[in-house]
Image (cartoon, rainbow, N blue to C red):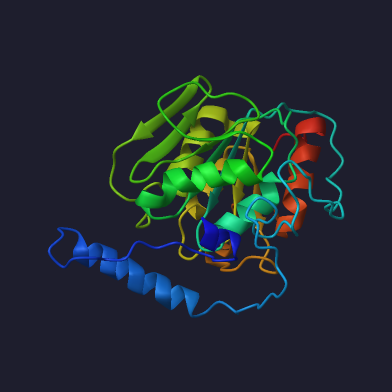
Amino acid sequence: MRALQAGALAVVEKPGSMARADYQTVARHLCTQLTIMSQVKVIRQRGRPRNGDEESPGNGGRGKGAAVTTPPPPPLPPSTAKRQFRALGIAASTGGPAALVKLLRGLPTNFPLPVFVVQHIGAPFVAGFASWLGSVTPLPVALASDAPHRPGHVYVAPGELHLTAEPGGMRLVHGDPVCGQRPSGDVLFSSLASAFGAAAIGVLLTGMGEDGARGLTAMHRAGAYTIAEHASTAVIHSMPGTAVRLGGVTEELPIDKVAARLLELVSTGVEPS
C-alpha cells in the first residue's frame, strides 16, 4: 500500500517457489503485467510528502475527507422525465488504485448509492487495498460479502470471487474467470444490468484488456447511465476504449470530472433511454 501511495500503478504477486501448483499461472500474470507496464509513460514527481496520512495517489497531498475541486463536466442533455438511481458499479485494472482515489475523494459522505468496486489486483493484496482505500477517501470501504448493502458505502470484490449485486444485497460467486479475471467487471456490470436496469450507473476506468466492456454495454442496453474514462487520463485505455467501440458508453470523461457527473446524476436524474 505504501508503493501505491508513492505512485505505483499495479501490485503483483511474485511467483515464489517453482513447486507451488499455480506457479505457471502466477508467472504468466507477472510477465503480462511487466509487458503492460513497459508501455506506460513514466512521470517523475519530486518533493512528494512522505507521510502516508497526508498523501495518496493523485490527491495532491489532501488529507482524508477532502474533496477534489475540478471544473464541472459538460452539461447533461435536457431531461424531463427523471429516474432515481439505486446503484453504482466501478471496474478498473492497471492504474486503477489512483483513479479510484481521485473518483471517490470527490464523493461526499452522504452519497446516496451503494458503490460496488472490482479492482484487478492480486488476491493476497485485496484486503489491504480495501483498508487503504478507506483510509484515504471519505466513504467507508469494506470487502464485499454475502450481505445487504448500504447507501454511501463502498464494497470491494474480494480476491478470486466474482461480485454480483441486486436490490436486496450482494452475492459472491465461485465461477470461472471472465476475460481472464476473477473478480470480473463484466460479471458485476451484467448483474447491475439485470437487477437494476435503468436505475444503475456503471463506470469503467483505466485498464488493459477487455474486462468490463461487455458488461458495461449490457448496462447501456438496459438503459443504465454508463461512463468510460477518457483516453486523456487513462493510464491504459484498453478496457474503457473497448466499451466505447462496442457502443456501450453514454459518455467519456476524464477521471477528474467523473465524480462531479455522478453527483449531478444522483441529484437531478436523466431522461430514461
Total count of labels? 0
In which quadrant will I find the C terminus? top right
Classify 133 as above or below 60: above
- Position of 237 with respect to 194 (left or right) is right
Where residue 245 sits in the image (x, y, percent)? 57, 63
Q: Position of residue 2 (x, y in %)?
A: 54, 58
Which of these two is toward me, 96 or 67? 67
Give whichever of 221, 40 is nearer the camera: 40
Q: Residue at x 83, y 45 (%)?
A: 76
Relative to residue 10, is residue 126 depicted above or below?
above
Q: Position of residue 60 (x, y in %)?
A: 75, 60
Furthest residue to the front?
A: 51
Q: Residue at x 64, y 59 (%)?
A: 57
Residue at screen point 29% across, 69% down:
28
Q: Image quadrant of residue 153?
A: top right
Q: Is residue 133 left or right of residue 267?
A: left
113 or 136, which is in the foreground? 136
